[in-house]
Image (cartoon, rainbow, N blue to C red):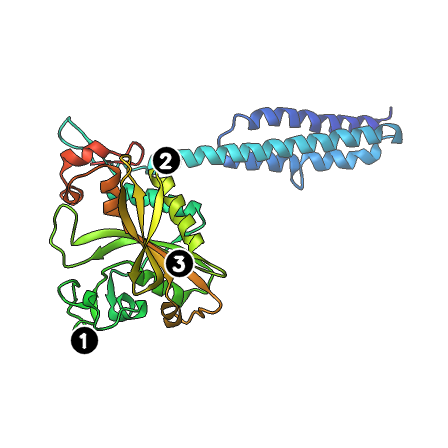
Amino acid sequence: MDAHTERAVADVSAFVEAVTETRKYLAKVSDPDRIDAAESELLGRKSLLVLARRQLGNLPSDIRKQAGRRVNEARDRLQQAVDEARSRVKAELRVQSYETDRLDLTERLISQRQRRGSLHLITQARDHLEDIFVGMGFTVAEGPEVESAWYNYEALNIPEWHPARGSFDTLFVDLGEPEEVMLRSHNSPVQIRTMEACEPPIYIVAPGRAFRRDTADATHLPTFNQIEGLVVDHDITMADLAGTVDEFVKAFFGREVDCRLRPSHFPFTEPSAEFDVSRPDGSWLELGGCGMVHPDVLRNCEVDPEVWQGFAFGFGIDRLVAIRYQLEDIRELANSDVRFLRQFQHPVREVLL
């Protein structure tokens, strides 16, 4: 073996050995600059890799291929070690940064008797209802609580002479023309706004607060929570409505609870119905109203009733909670009595008081 061959073999071996030592070094280093320096020393323009590759031409053909493979494999191992070291050091520096910049903003009570709060019963029920209807293919829609007469009444086929539009039932707001702006008395305006803004098919539920001039008693509140649903699609029938209501009732109360529809009348649906749920003693309890969307309501939203049909339903969340937990006085839900609310603490989504 001549001197040129010996020098070439030595340079190749030196690169391979340097890669082995550098990989051990990179496994322990924690400085990004040192990683860059090691990479430049072995893989840069004037590195041992460049020298080893130049020397391959001085090797006899019978060992050149094997030496070239050693050089390439060593280079790949080194590049992998460099990438792994960079990822590790980056993660370590991120953790250090989090620890350095972290601020403890926890509020703590002076008293040692710390108590944890939870979601209110109404919020728990609303979240549960949204989950049920989202699972059935609905989306959640919201709208303003202060509405005009158009959205709260006229678009819903409730004429000016209708008793529901009187001041004895509606809480008017001192804006615009007299009796033209009010706190919404139901969540149906969300349905109108959705039909105006979206092309069918529409599948929505609209939870939220509504307001009426009621005196608070065991079964009524002036500010209450409703959830209303609207479906507009091709070939929708009362059978679709009945199936939807029945599935909701069973999902919320249990599969053993039955549901029935009774004929009724609402200005915004035709035909209309009330829906009841069964009690363990065999009696029935009214839960809410529903029906097929009145053609005039569809026309008011520029939806052709000859092409699209729909159904709507609505019920009070407060009453639903009162039924589920057998509350004798619905005012308990608005009194904020901590002793009462602690009986229904949510086991998961807790917040520190």
Mark on residue 177? 1
Q: Which residue is identified by label 2?
A: 256
The disc at residue 311 is 3
The one nearer the camera, 345 or 62, is: 345
Q: In what quadrant of the picture does the C terminus appear?
A: top left
In this view, 176 is above or below 352: below
**Can you give x and y, in whole percent of width and height, for residue 203 in the image?**
43, 56
- Picture disc at residue 320: none
Q: Where residue 142 sits in the image (x, y, percent)?
A: 33, 57
* Mark 1 neighbour class, 10 Å CA radius: few under 14, some 14 to 19, many 20 or more: few
Q: Is residue 244 left or right of residue 326?
A: right
* Quadrant position of residue 301: bottom left
Relative to 189, is 169 on the left or the right? left
State yes or no: discs 1 and 2 in contact (Cβ < 8 Å): no
Q: Residue furthest bottom?
A: 177
Amino acid under disc 3: Phe
Going from N to C along the chain, the mark reached first, 3 or 2, is: 2
Question: Can you say whether 176 is above or below 294 in the image?
Answer: below
Give the Cα distance between marks 3 and 1: 33 Å
Q: Which quadrant of the figure contains the N terminus?
A: top right
Residue in the foreground of this view, choosing between 26 and 212 = 212
> Between residues 285 and 168, which one lies in front from this camera angle?
285
Q: Helix, strand, or loop for circle 1?
A: loop
Question: Measured from the top left, where is residue 90 in percent x and y?
Answer: 48, 36
